[in-house]
Amino acid sequence: MRFLEKIFQTFSSQVLPTACIACGLFQKLSICEKCLDLLKADGLLNYECCLQCGICLEVPELNERRCAQCVNNPPYFDNTYCLDRYAGILQEGLHQLKYQKRLAFANGLASAWNQTIADQFIDQHANYLLPVPLSTEKLAVRGFNQSWEIAQRICCASHITKSSYILRRDHYSEHQAGRSFVSRHHSVRGMFYIEPMYLASLENKVVIVFDDVMTTGATLNEIAGILKDNGVSCVINWVLLRTSKAT
Ligand SMILES: [Zn+2]
Ligand SMILES: [Zn+2]
């Protein structure tokens, strides 16, 4: 199926115009060269960010290469790498994917990742790449997991196994949007679990967790905590878009 999709994409990119996922310009690529240049020049990937949580560092934090929050209260995950800010040029494309269910935008978002940040990770030592899961109920409503749709299409070393079956999420009915930083931390407790048949395979492994948006880091921290409780030695977050510091 993926093979056929690739053939179709190659064919359509040659003969059909398409709209850039960032600026909407009709041309041949899912993200146009001008928008790619913008990302390469000013995307969050160019900035000095906290090695652990990916937030843009303040000047006094530069030496440590970690933000004050990670120094004072380290999260369970070890590293975080983000392509761009949430408020940047890819936000609308991600909304089209998530809320308008336009699956083709996953190609453009993955293409933006592959042409900017992917090279940095070509030698990444890791065993698994797992998307942040949706609950079965949410998956049924949306029809797909946007993080998995992007994660499937991003380039990474061939020894890294991508899987959407290992990490699972219980249904949670209260809507998180608009809740405070503190209450969000409580709201994700106990939501995630590991599919029992995969538990043994995670022992002493390095796991990359892929998320479309990182806000407070509470969700990714909960996932990293569960992975580490079950023997994972290192958890690395790959994130498409990062919001700025919680206030
Ligand atoms: Zn564009
Ligand atoms: Zn940090």
Image (cartoon, rainbow, N blue to C red):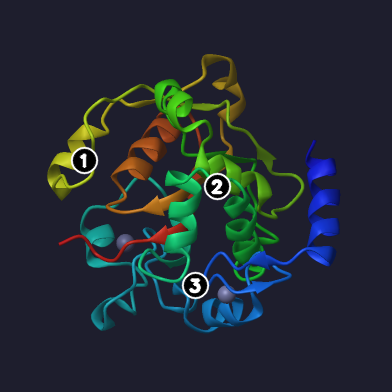
The amino acid type of the residue labelled 1 equals: His
Provide residue 117's location: percent of width, then percent of height. Answer: 60, 67
* For residue 139, side relative to residue 74 (left or right): right
Residue picked out by circle 1: 185
Marks 2, 3: nearer the viewer: 2
User: Is the C-beta separation of discs 3 and 1 under 8 Å?
Assistant: no
Q: Position of residue 137 (x, y in %)?
A: 41, 21
Q: Residues within 10 Å of mark 3 (few under 14, many from 20)?
A: some
Q: Nearer the N terminus, badge 2 or badge 3?
A: 3
| Residue 102: mark | 2
Q: Secondary structure at mark 1?
A: helix
Q: Residue at x 32, y 62 (%)?
A: 243
The x, y position of residue 218, in whole percent, is 29, 44
Viewer-side residue, 221 vs 37? 37
Label 1 neighbour load within 10 Å: few <14, some 14-19, many 20+: some
Mark 1 / mark 2, whichever is N-terminal: 2
From the image, which quarter does the N terminus lie in?
A: top right
Q: Quadrant of residue 63?
A: bottom left
Q: Quadrant of ligand 2?
A: bottom left
- Which one is nearer the viewer's eye here, 67 or 111? 111
Residue, x 66% and y 53% (percent of image)?
A: 154
Q: Are marks 1 and 2 in contact (CB under 8 Å)?
A: no
Where disc 2 sits, the SS reads loop
How many discs appear? 3
Q: Is residue 79 left or right of residue 17?
A: left
- Circle 3 sits on which residue? 45
